Amino acid sequence: MHSIAQVAGAKLVNLKTNLDLRGSFTETYRQEWFPELPPMIQSNRSDKVANCVVGLHYHLFQADYWYVVAGRARIVLYDLRVGSPTEKGLWSQDVSGDDSIGIYVPPGVGHGFSSLTDLTLYYQVDSYYNPEDELGVLWNDPDLGIDWGLVDPVISERDSKCKLFSQLTRDELPRF
C-alpha cells in the first residue's frame, strides 16, 4: 500500500492475486490495512456499460474503498478539501479487473470513474447511505481539467445537474 501523492490520505493498495489451475483468488480488503480508520460497514456493486462517467462525487463524512472486478475504468480523484496540503490535487489512473488494485478515498475527496469498457466496480463505504452527504461537482468542470478518456459519455441526470466547483458555497466545501 502506498499513498497517492496528489491527494493526501488517499491510498493505492497493490493486492496479491494467487493463481492455480482452478483460477484465481484475491484478498481485496482487510481492515488491518487501515488501522487508524473507521471500519467499512456497507458493500456495493456498480455495473456500467462502456462510455459512462460517474461523478465527480464527494462526501463530507464518508470514505470509500474501490476495487475494479471486471472491465477497465479510469479512476479519478480530485482533492476538494479546503486546507489540505494537496488542495486541488488531481490523480487519475486506468485500472482493470486484471490489475488487483484497491483504492481508498478519504472524505472530502472528489471521486469518479469512466467506464472505458463494460465494467463492474465493487466498493465499500464506512457509513450507511445518507442523501445529505451525497454531493458532487460537475463532471466536466473546465477548472478541474479532468480527462475522462471518453468522447460524449453517458451521464446520469444527477451528475449532469451538479454545480461547477466555483459555484460551491463555503458550507458545501469539505475541510481537511
Image (cartoon, rainbow, N blue to C red):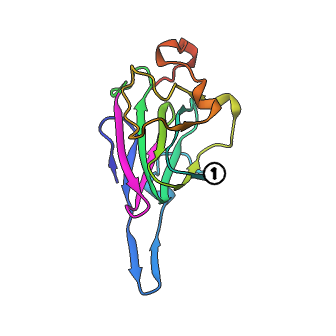
Residue found at the very far front of the displayed protein:
152
Indicate the quadrant containing the N terminus: top left, top right, bottom left or bottom right. Answer: bottom left
In the rendered image, the vertical position of residue 114 relative to residue 6, given as above or below? below
Work out whether residue 134 can be spotted: no
Horizontal side of 101 relative to 39 (left or right) equals: left
Q: Residue at x 47, y 42 (%)?
A: 113
In the rendered image, residue 138, in percent from the top left (x then y), is placed at: 52, 25
Q: Quadrant of the C terminus?
A: top left
Quarter of the image for residue 8 reads top left
- The answer to which image quadrant residue 156 occupies is top right
Give the overall secondary structure of the magenta segment. Answer: strand
Q: Could you tell me the amino acid type at mark 1?
A: Ile
Q: Is residue 152 visible?
A: yes
**Of helix, strand and loop, which one carries label 1?**
loop
Tell me if residue 27 is in the magenta stretch: no
Q: Is residue 49 left or right of residue 2?
A: right
Residues drawn in magenta: 89-105
Looking at the image, which is closer to me, 53 or 105? 53
Q: Is residue 167 left or right of residue 133?
A: left
From the top left corner, tell me how far across and down residue 43 is, in percent.
Answer: 62, 54
Please indicate whether residue 67 sits to the left or right of residue 60 in the image.
left
Looking at this rendering, what residue extends furthest in the left direction?
A: 5
Residue 152 spot, x, y in % from top left: 47, 35
Number of marks = 1
Residue at figure coordinates x 48%, y 23% from the top left: 175
Residue located at (55% from left, 12% from top): 169
Q: Quadrant of residue 161?
A: top right
Question: Residue at horizontal 68%, vertical 43%?
Answer: 128
Residue 18 lies, in percent from the top left, at 39, 76
| Residue on which the image places disc 1 | 41
Residue 21 vertical position relative to residue 81 in the rendered view, above or below: below
